[in-house]
Image (cartoon, rainbow, N blue to C red):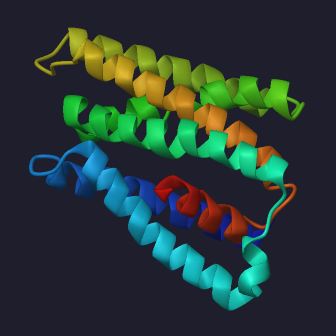
Amino acid sequence: MNTYGVTYSLTAALCFAIAPIIYNNYLSTASPITINLLRIFTACIVTSSMLLLIEGTNGFIITGFIALIMVLIVIAGTILGDTLYLYSIRYLGPSIGQAITSTYPLFVYFIARIIVKEFISLPQLLAVVSIVIGLIMIFKRGANSNVHLSYLGLVVGITCALSWSLSISMSAYVLQQITPLQYMALRNIISLV
């Protein structure tokens, strides 16, 4: 097991747990599109500065084909997926919105199998079953309690998960060609363009 990989994953998980709560606080005063643009702008400054310091100007050079895939990643993941994520939080609240959009691994497994020919292992298949069971529990909870589940919110959340899964699957290919830092910086730059 790679200690760095586990550390990075746990740090990302912590950020993903805190982010919907912070976003929810600002969604009452700003639109999801405004919040997404501010998030992208901030990330662009940080990641571009890091790339410039670590790899110099050569870090910003990629092939035309990779640039095209990066544009598709930005459209599917950053523009459509992230904006839909914020709308799902607005419509469903942070806990249910996060749970619904976190079903993206369900789609990633199948799309990655097609795009990058990844093998789906038994543990991954069990994870898919767990995700489906979790969705059923959320739907039943909404139907059997005072929690109001907006059908628009559910559609938005699931569409977000599908958009993210397309982006993640394409990212798997791109990350075989460029560094993760290049990927993050260039994705944020393309998002702003």
**Residue found at x 81% / y 63%:** 178
**Residue found at x 46% / y 68%:** 43
Q: Nearer the viewer, residue 13 or 159?
A: 159
119 with respect to 191 (left or right)? right
61 with respect to 144 (left or right)? right
Q: Is residue 26 visible?
A: yes
Q: Nearer the viewer, residue 68 or 83?
A: 68
Q: In the current view of this chain or complex, which residue is farthest to the bottom?
A: 53
**Residue found at x 39% / y 27%:** 157
Residue 81 percent location from the top left of the image: 47, 37
Residue 186 percent location from the top left of the image: 64, 63
Residue 152: name its quadrant.
top left
Residue 185 percent location from the top left of the image: 61, 68
Q: How many marks?
A: 0
144 in relation to 115, above or below? above
Residue 119 percent location from the top left of the image: 88, 30
134 with respect to 56 (left or right)? left
174 in relation to 51, above or below? above
